Image (cartoon, rainbow, N blue to C red):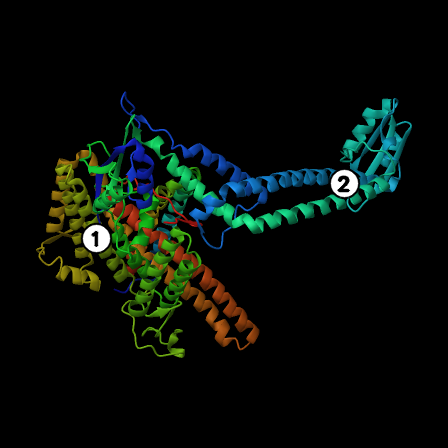
Amino acid sequence: MLKPEEMTRVVVVGSIESLDATIECLYELGVLHLIDFTEQDEEFRIGQPLPTASDTSQKLLKLRSIIRSLEIEDHKPARAMHVHDIRSRMDQALVTLDLNTSSKADSRQKIQALVREKEGEIRALEPIVPFAIPVELFDGYDNLSSFVGICKTDPSAALTSKVAECEVFADARKSDVVVVAFVKSEGRTEASKILAEHGFQEIKLPKVKGDPDEIVVQLRKQIKELEADLARIEADLDAIRKQFADFIISSDEHLSIEILKAETPLRIATSANSFIIDGWAPSHRVDEIRTALDTMCCGLAFIETVSPEKSEETPVKLKNPKPVKPFEFFINLVSTPKYEEIDPTLVLFITFPLFFGFMIGDLGFGLSLVVLGAMIRWKFKSSPDLLKLGAIILAGGFMASVFGLFVFAEAFGVPFHPPVENPDEHSWEVIANIPIHPLLDKMRDSMEMIAISLVAGWIHLTVGFTFGFVNHYPHSKKHAVGKIAWLLVLFGLFAEMMVIAGDATQTSHFMNSTVLSPIPDVSADMIGIKVSMPALGLIVAGVLGIVVFEGAMALTEVVGVFTNLVSYARLAAMAIGKGAVAVAFNFMLFPMIFESGNIVVAILGVLALFVSQAFFVFFIGALSSGIQAIRLNYVEFFLKFFEGGGTEFSPLSYERKYSVITK
Amino acid sequence: MALDPTAVGLALVGAGIAIGAAGIGTGIAQAQIGAAAVGATAEDPKMFGKGLTLMVLPETIVIFGFVVAFLIYGLV
């Protein structure tokens, strides 16, 4: 929590004979983050791929082409295959598959091309069938030009009147006209101009002889024969698919892993007799690597821990308890934290559901979100990102239900009990008398809600500046102290706001009498505003501190602290806004449902209510509340301390889904 | 204090203008940032987090409008 997993800089060295065993061992463990070797010298050069590499990649290439021919890219084997079985069947299966599939796939392709060609010919000939003119007569004259095509409107009249000595055949169809025109060569230009005016599109006739009708019948017969051949080939391929698909996909995975391993030497340093692998490993697992190397490499390779150089960047593996893990999703959306930085996932885990819950604050919508989150987790087990998102929605929905039940006492925008001032308002009392009364009313206690938001903002920002202090402390004491100056400004501003609010809200009253009670109550009226002298003193001291420790330029950002603090008022704004929208729809549609007395109108009202609530309040509300909750973290909170740009820990490892290792 | 109804009315109109105008301002700012952010994200999905952060920055303007509106609302 708050700090990533501790990493140790390690070096694995060994005799060159044990290189493949070492690579195998490291991939099995999956805990070593390799540093690519780049600086070659006399002694050490980049390694050569393992001897198996070229043979394996040839096999994989063949396999991939077979996968394409069989069109089984998306096939998922029912169960994983033993690597031992894959190896023993590989060579023979590849020969069989190669013999049976490539020739068949070739023929299939040729037949498909032929069918397409013949269909094209049919398409060209069909329009001229009604004219019953043999195809060879359309072309090959010395003094005659022929036009065959389709016009949008009939050009016959225009052609016969304007072009001397021409013969036009036209066949009107549903939306266009098929036109065949023979004109003397000298009238050619004029004819094409007229045709163009009628939207003429030429048809290219195939080079065949005979009556077009007969030819079309002939072509259809040929296509039918070709399709029968195609079906036979498909059946053969299907049989192969049934027999080999599982094996092919499992082998594809196995060979990919083999190549990954075989090409690893390209990333490490080797000399004539030895190799060196530089990397990082989680500190508590170094011993595990040591033991594994001892047993698998017979003492020919061993691991040493070394102290890292200053310029080296430690890879980051975030370390959080299981319930907090899903919130790493938000961190990864921005950037991986640096190794020395605080990992803010824990704060997100606490603040995101709280902010989200406060903004939604409704038992009905909260429970719906819980169900939605659970469904996402259940339906999309295979996608890690969606699993995390599901957990986040679930947590947010849970907090929204808690707020809805105990604080706002409402469900689906309808309160459990009508407010005292307006006893006729719609409420759940009609159905059940729930013994919970609201602590806050969204529509009436808006100042109270803004005050609560400000307190939340003050706490959140204080944590942010504190993190900034901790992050800066090891490398720049000056910047770290600067963060304390910012904290002073923040505290002064917050105290001043609470002094202005005074006893107007319970929250400010509570803050003034507890957290802020040590501050002496010395205030003066300035331009009609009550200004607390100690608070003003804190702000001035803070600003001076900022100038000293962070430079005069930082002064421009002082107003930003005020902006940040007020920015948290969005918590109240979203809650009130969302509540108001729900109430507005209920107010408009409830009379239609309960008081119209007409069943059709009532059903329409229920439908409208459902759509408006589901879309505007639930969907848009949840989306915008989620964005606002994460924004407060990204903008207001993260900018106080977070730099990011760390390297993610990605160890040598692989994932087997469709193949299993036989020990 | 009992206020003249006209004054109350004008104050409420003021509250409306505060939040309405702030909303328009935010909209104008977000329109441009949003378009640029979508472009950046399309080129490199890793920009999503940064894009979102920049995209929501002007929202603070409308929050100011909201706060001012409620301060006025609280006065009348």
Q: Earlier in the sequence, mark 2 or mark 1?
A: 2
Residue at image mark 1: A458
Q: Amino acid at mark 2?
A: Arg
Query: Where is residue A369, by image quadrant?
Result: bottom left
Q: B72 or A605: nearer the eye? A: A605
Q: Position of residue A542 (x, y in %)?
A: 14, 43
Please indicate whether residue A598 sits to the left or right of residue A277 in the image. right
Whether residue A529 is visible here, answered yes or no, is no
Q: Residues within 10 Å of mark 1 (few under 14, many from 20)?
A: many
- Give the tally of numbered discs: 2
Please indicate whether residue A190 sits to the left or right of residue A549 in the image. right
Q: A607 or A559: nearer the eye? A: A607
Secondary structure of the residue carrying numbered label 2: helix
Whether residue A648 is visible here, answered yes or no, is yes
Q: A179 or A407: nearer the eye? A: A179
In the picture shown, does residue A639 fall above or below A45?
below
Please indicate whether residue B72 sits to the left or right of residue A49 in the image. left
Residue at image mark 2: A123
Q: Residue at x 18, y 50 (%)?
A: A493
Camera-near label (2 vs 1) is 2
Distance between the alpha carbons at the discs numbered 2 and 1 = 75 Å
Q: Position of residue A627 (x, y in %)?
A: 36, 52
Q: A663 or A519: nearer the eye? A: A663
Q: Position of residue A314 (x, y in %)?
A: 24, 38
> Extreme top residue here?
A42
Q: Dot 2 falls on which chain? A: A
